Every structure is written in C-alpha cells, then in structure tokens.
Amino acid sequence: MTDIKWLVGEIRGRAWPWTLDGADSLASALHCRLLEERAGRRTYEVPEGSTMSVYHDGHVVEFIEVTLDVVLNLHLLSLSDYENTKDRFFQKFEDVVAEATNVLGPPVFNDGAAAAEFPSDQDAEWLALWHHPCGRIMLEQKHEDKELPLRLSIVLAPPPQ
C-alpha cells in the first residue's frame, strides 16, 4: 500500500485545477505513470503499486480516485470470512484516517453513510473528509455489493455545489 503520509502530504501541498492538464500535473508531481486511457477516465500507476483514476467529461475533471487497497472475490468467502474481512478492512480505514490526520489535522467529517452530514455526492460506506483550497480530500471505504470489490481510496473532489 502506498505511504499515506507521503501521498496526502503531496496532495495537500499542491493545487489541482479541475482540468485534465491540472490532473496530469498532479500525476506528474506524484511520480505517476499513465497506464490506460479510456473515454472518461485516465488511469495512472502511483509509486508502490496503487492506481490513480482521473474521471473526466471532456477536459473537465469530475473527481480523482487513488485506490489504496482492494479485496476481490468477496462473494467466494463464507459468511464468517466475509464479515471478518469487512471488519479487518474497516480497521485499515481507521488506521489510514489516523495516518492522514497526522498530516492534515482532524477531519471535518468522519462517519458512515447513514450520518446526516455524509456528503450526498459520494458513494461509500465510511468517509473521512478534509477541506483543501482546491476542493475536498476524502478517505473512503467503498463496498457497493458482496459481488463487488471492497476498496479503500483517497478521493479528490470539487467543493460541494
């Protein structure tokens, strides 16, 4: 997994305009290598093996997601192994939030999707949020369905509208 303190420190210390050129500059500053380009998404390799996906509409970036960790094939696990895996992954989320807090300070929000203040434009189970002059830095634990991967990500998104 990518060094969280280094990554959030680099993100915090940079401007990222919501354009493809701005995303390319951020990717370059993070020493990323372009892996793939498809309609609406560019995917980069981040040092230490993580990936960064830039989702865009034309030249306007909608959000950036750095996948820190992923668990695949959850549907193949027994119910108890599935629950244990989810518990271990939640602990990873808590650990990563603690590391990011050492760099960014306390998050302005840190709770689950059922919380009233949960950002309505995000799709995650758990989320920690910090404000940045360019937008929002969020750590998210995502798991949309048992057949889909369990993911731990950093999401950069514009300020809420």
Image: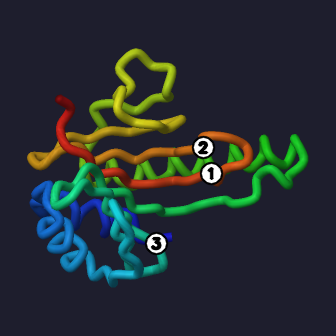
Label 1: how many Cα within 10 Å (few below 14, some 14–19, many 20+):
many
Q: Check if mark 2's residue and mark 1's residue have beta carbons within 8 Å.
A: yes
Is 22 displayed left or right of 116 in the figure?
Answer: left
Give the mark nearest the N terminus, 2 or 1: 2
Q: Name the residue under label 1.
A: 150
The residue lying at 21 percent from left, 79 percent from top is 28
Residue 34 image offset from top left, x and y in percent: 34, 81
Mark pair 3, 1: CA separation: 15 Å
Q: What element carries label 2?
A: loop
Q: Which quadrant, please, contains the C terminus?
A: top left
Q: Check if mark 3's residue and mark 1's residue have beta carbons within 8 Å.
A: no
Q: Mark 2 points at which residue?
A: 143
The residue lying at 40 percent from left, 78 percent from top is 36
Q: Mark 3 points at which residue?
A: 50
Give the mark nearest the N terminus, 2 or 3: 3
Amino acid at dot 1: Leu
Amino acid at dot 3: Ser
Q: Quadrant of residue 129?
A: top left
Is 146 displayed left or right of 91 in the figure?
Answer: right
Q: What element carries label 1?
A: strand
Amino acid at dot 2: His
In depth, the one of 36 and 10 nearer the eye is 36
The residue lying at 23 percent from left, 43 percent from top is 136
Mark pair 2, 3: CA separation: 18 Å
